Amino acid sequence: MALISPEEYKNSLNDGRVVYYKGERVENVATHPDLGVCTDLMAVDYELAENPEYQDLAVMEDLETGEKISRYYYKPQTADDLLKAHELIVKSTELGDGYIPLAHDIGADALNAINITANIIGKPEYIERIENYRKVLQGKDLATCAAVTDVKGNRMLRPSDPGQAHPDFNLRIVEKNKDGIIVRGAKMHITGAAYCNDIIAIPCHAMTEADADYAVAFAIPANTKGIRQVCRPFRSRISNLEFPNDRPVRVHTDSLIIFDDVLVPWERVFLCGEWKHAATMVYNFALMHRRTGCSYRIPLSEQFVGVGAAIAEYHGITKAPHVREKLTDLIVYLETLKSLSKTACYDFVKRGGLAVPNPIATNMAKYHFAHNYHDVIKIVQDLAGGILVTAPTYKDYQHPDLHDDIEKYLQASKSVSTENRLRMLDLIRRITSADLETICLHGEGSPMAERMTIFMEGGNVLKDCQKMVEEMAQVKK
Ligand SMILES: Cc1cc2nc3c(=O)[nH]c(=O)nc-3n(C[C@H](O)[C@H](O)[C@H](O)COP(=O)(O)OP(=O)(O)OC[C@H]3O[C@@H](n4cnc5c(N)ncnc54)[C@H](O)[C@@H]3O)c2cc1C
């Protein structure tokens, strides 16, 4: 059986891994009151694969064995493969109420980036190792994360620069022996690492020859000796000051992962000093991961359109010209993201034998999302009005001395109850929180990273357009 159930996934996490949360060692992440909420979100991926309604999208047949495998771990070859994966991410994120479950997708982005790099390097042992690892992931349906971002130290200095306070700001090889490599360092912000099975680590930027020890990529179980994780705190339940809501709270946490002289066996080492190819790996990861990012931001963008339309209606202002303008802006934001994300799949390029989303369209989609994100929040907050931050709480609403007055005075449109207006404001506060703002900006790379890629990939566009106008002007060369 190649696919596992949500329960099998959760049970697999009770494996002695070392995870800290709010200053305490966690015994079992799946049953922890807070981290269990994240685990439930990741399990949505496994629930979706079991649901007959989504099987065509989520499950594929292994061509060799005939076994059922997750679409995420299938090697993309065509535009249709990319589109289906895009649709799967959108669907799973909808089921996660705007949060991507993440059991396979970011790990798959790293897997594919390693696969492309192995094919480009052309070393038979690397190709064999990554093909074998893909089979393991398909066969066991493991949950994976991508540990890419190093803690980095001084950003303006190379990893090996003697000016760095110490040499371990970027994950590096400290020893090679007959069993494998020993790695030391720390990766940061790694989403889902505390409750995935395997951590797939790749470099986070290009390397120079002096940085060869930092050109390292591998996969390793999260409970491997020497790995410690520290999770960031998060809001795991709706506060009792908000209106009660039965829908499960959806949230992820991100880990600081400390690799304290960890042994990685050779069969899981995918890059080991080939410094020139660190860039190949991270570049292709960024492309695929930004496409993933744009796909899972579509349901969140739909939520912005939805709350904008709802609160405008609840306030009775929908017909005002400036409100129509603002709602139009929300639609433009969403539809541009959807179109660019799909274009990136249709107009794919081949890299190392795999289909990769179009580099310019992907980076434009991610840049569009991140760059305009705060404007969209501004529109939603504007339409919501000051009551967004000054409204009485659910507790006040319930108080017998206050209830009738709140009910009377905080109604806006006659057709919408005060309770519904306050419920919508609760939701707007949740989906426009500062946590989400940072992930929207920095997740999958900072906006500057996208602009740099657009400029780099746009080199031919500049040349072709210049050539065209030079011909028109009959410039003499
Ligand atoms: C919620 C969340 C989840 C994430 N999940 C993951 C994950 O699952 N896996 C993963 O690997 N990563 C993950 N990331 C990391 C994400 O990819 C990084 O945040 C992003 O790449 C930016 O890196 P940084 O945070 O280290 O920014 P920094 O490098 O600290 O950047 C801060 C500022 O410095 C500038 N800067 C940085 N370096 C230079 C330089 N050399 N020259 C000039 N300016 C510079 C940047 O442009 C930016 O303005 C996540 C991030 C967030 C916020």
Image: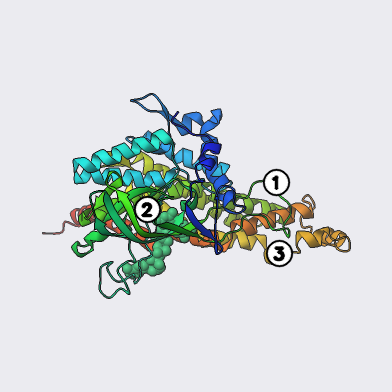
Of discs 3 and 1, which sits in the foreground? Answer: 1
Ligand 1: image quarter: bottom left
| Spatial CA span between label 3 and label 1 | 24 Å
Q: Nearer the viewer, mark 1 or mark 2?
A: 1
Position of 248 with respect to 268 (left or right) is right
Q: Which residue was labeled with disc 2?
A: 363
Give the amino acid at mark 3. Answer: Ile
Pointer 3 residue: 387
Percent from the top left, x then y, of residue 369? Answer: 46, 55
Amino acid carrying label 2: it is Asn
- Residue 176 x/y as whole percent: 23, 55
Quick check: 113 above or below 379? Answer: above
N-terminal-most mark, 3 or 1: 1
Q: Nearer the viewer, residue 43 or 98?
A: 43
Q: Residues within 10 Å of mark 1 (few under 14, many from 20)?
A: few
Residue located at (60% from left, 56% from top):
431
